Amino acid sequence: MTSRPRPVGIDLGTTNSAIAWVGRDGRTAMVPNSDGEILTPSVVCFQDAEVVVGKEARKATAVEPQRVAQWVKRDMGAPVYTRPIQGEYLPPEVIQACILRKLKADLAASLGDDCRVVITVPAYFDEPRRKATADAGEMAGIDVLDIVNEPTAAALAFGESIGYLAPGGAVRDELTVLIYDLGGGTFDVTLLRMAPGDIQALATDGDVRLGGHDWDMRLVDHVARAFRREHGLDPRDDPASMSRLMDSAVDAKHALSARSRTTLRVDHAGKSLDLPVTRAQFDEMTADLLERTIHTTRQVLSDIGMEWRHVDRLLLVGGSTRMPRVVERLRELSGLEPERSVNPDEAVARGAALFAQYLLTRGSTTPVDDTEAPTGFTVTNVTAHSLGVEGIDQATLRRTNVKLIRRNAPLPAKHTEKFVTKAENQRSIAIQILQGENAAPEECTPIGRTSIDNLPAGLPKGWPVEVTFEYEANGRLKVEAVVPGTHRAVTLELERSVGLSDDGLGQWKEIVASGAGFDAFEAMIAEALEEKIEPLPQSEIAAAPTKTESIASSPAAPIRSAPTPFRSAPTPLGASANLAAAIEEPSVPSEPEPARPVAKLDEPVENWMMPAEAPPASEKASTRRRSPRWIVGLVVYVTSGLAGAGLAYLLLSRLRPEQFPMPW
C-alpha cells in the first residue's frame, strides 16, 4: 500500500515562523529548525553572495540594517516592500519566499521532501495578500495545498487538544469559541462553533496592521523622546541605533510580562541613557492599541447578534497575548477566563498541519497505510471581506460598491444581483470586481475585471443585466453575467488571479531556489528595468494595497519613486479569462423588466449599469421639483449679504446719526 505525502503546516508569521506536521498516529508535532529551535525569526539579510534567514539575520540588523528586511508580512499584497534593500525595492512575496525556502530546508532535513503544505494567513487578509502568500510558497519551491486562516488553524489545534476532531466517542456538547489572535504584526478575532468532528466559523474581523510590533514601537518612541530631552539627539535617526533600540524595546516588553519594572538602555552617537519603565507605564502608553482590539472583538459579536453570555471559551493565540494587560482586559470584558490550551506560538502551525491532513484525506481514494490515522472532521469557513461589483447609484449617480457576497457569509456562497443598463443603445458592459466593505469603490481592492461586448443595437435604457458570484471554499470566485433576451453572457473564474505574473514568478523562483545572494537579485531588477519585463503602470496594479493602506503613507519613499520591474505587463482579465461572447445572433429584444439600479460596467459613462432597485416614486417627484443647487446657494448668499448690510447701517446710525441718518 502506498502512503500519502506528509501533511505539513507553516505559520508564516510577522515576527517568527514555525512548522508542524501530522504523524501516522494523527497527532501533530513541531519541526525544529537547523538551530534546534521551534521558532525561526522572520528576518532576511541579503548578503552579496548569500541570503541569510533567521537568528543570524536578526543579529545583522544592528550592523547592516540596509541589508535586512523584517516585518515583511505587513506589506504583503503591496507592489514593493516599504524599505529599499541596498537601494533596491523588492516585492514582499520575494522576501517571504526566502523565509519559506529556509523553512523548506529545515522541513526536508527532518521529514524529507515528500510533503504537502498549508500556509496560514490572517483571517482579514484580502485576496491580493493571500495570492502574494501563495506566490511566495511557489517561489520557494513548496508544494502548497492551500492557504488557511490563522484563527481557523488555531481552532483545529484547540480541537485536537480537547478531543473534538473525531466525531466518535462520548457525546460532547457544542462549544462556541472566540479566538483572539494577537501576533507580532497582525490581529484577528474569529468566532467559531465547535462540535465533535465539525468546526464552523461564524464571523471574523481583524486588523492587518496591528500587532505586538506596535507595542514595541510605543516603547521605542518613549525612550527616544527621553534620550532627545537628555542629549538633544534622536536615536531613531540612525538605522543602527534604531535597530539596537528596537531590540531593547522587545526585550523590555518581554521582561514586563514577567515582572513589574525593567530598564531600557539606549546608546547613540557616543552617548547613552538608562530609562526605568514600569508595567503600569507600559500599559498606559499602549492602552489605545489594546482598545482597538477590544472594539474589533465587540464588533464580531455584534455582527451576528451575539453577546458574551453566548461564548463558552475564550482562546488566546499569538505571542503578544502573553502581555498581562491583554489577559486582564479580556477577563474584564468577557467575564470568562482567557485560556491557552495550546502554546500560543505553536497553535497556528499545528492547526495548519491538521488542515493539510484534512485536505489530503477528504474525498481521496488513494490507499493509505494501515498505520495512518483517518481524518474525521469537517471545516466550514466564512468570507473575511465582502465581494461586489462597481456600480452607479440611481439616486445619486455616484459610483458605489454593490455587494453580492457579504462578509461572514458561510463558504461556499452564491448570490445573483440584478442590474440595468444606464444608457440607450448600450453596446458593452464592463464588470469591475471589488473586495471590501466600503461603499466607495476607490476604497476597495479591485481583484478582477471582465466585460460583455457586442450587445445588439437598439437596447433601451434600463435593460436588465444579471450578475452571479459563486465563491468556493478554496478561494476560487466564479463570475457570470447575463443580458437576458440577447444571448450575450460572460463567465470569468478568478483563482487568486492578482499578484505576480507567471513569467515574473518563474524568474524569481529561479533566483530564490538558487540560494544566490543579492547580486542575483540586482541582476533581476536590472534586467527588468531594461524592459525585458515591462513595468506595470501604477494605475493598473491589481495587487496594490487599498487607498487607506497605501505604501506611500508609510515612512518609506512614495510608491511612484520605487521601481516595479517585477510586475509584468498585464493581460486584460477579459482576454485571459476565456470570455464567452455571443454563441448565436441575438434575438429581437422584447420589453425589459421594470427599471432596476445600474452597476458600472465600463469606463465610458454610457456603458455603466445600475443596481436594480429604483428610488420610490415620491422621492423621484420631489427630486424633479427641487431647484438647482446653484440657484438656491445664490439666493441664500444675496439674502445674507443684504441682511448683514442692513444691520451694519442700523448700528452705525445709532452711533453716528449725523453721518448715517435713518431714511425715515
Image: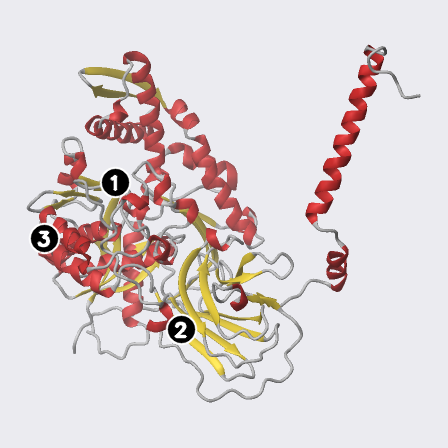
Tell me the CA gap for discs 2 and 1: 36 Å
Tell me the CA gap for discs 3 and 2: 38 Å
Q: Nearer the viewer, residue 422 or 26?
A: 422
Say how the picture is coloured: secondary structure
Q: Local crowd at mark 1 within 10 Å, few (<14), some, or many (≥20)?
A: many
- Disc 3, disc 2: CB below 8 Å? no
Instruction: Kindly identify the amino acid type of the residue bearing the numbered disc 1.
Output: Arg
Pick whichever of labels 3 and 1 is earlier in the sequence: 1
What percent of the width, then of the height, locates residue 345? 29, 45
At a point 81% along the width and 17% down the height, the residue shown is 651
- List the residue tagged with mark 2: 492
Q: Local crowd at mark 3 within 10 Å, few (<14), some, or many (≥20)?
A: some
Circle number at residue 83: 1
Instruction: Kindly identify the amino acid type of the residue bearing the numbered disc 2.
Output: Leu
- List the residue tagged with mark 3: 515
Foreground mark, 3 or 2?
2
Foreground mark, 3 or 1?
1
What percent of the width, then of the height, locates residue 411? 44, 66
- Disc 2, disc 1: CB below 8 Å? no
What percent of the width, then of the height, locates residue 286? 41, 30
Q: Is residue 243 visible?
A: yes
Q: Nearer the viewer, residue 567 or 32?
A: 567
Q: Nearer the viewer, residue 120 or 399?
A: 399
At a point 54% along the width and 57% down the height, the residue shown is 399
Q: Is residue 248 above or below residue 450?
A: above
Q: Is residue 156 above or below residue 330?
A: below
At a point 35% along the width and 42% down the height, the residue shown is 552
Tell me the CA gap for discs 3 and 1: 22 Å
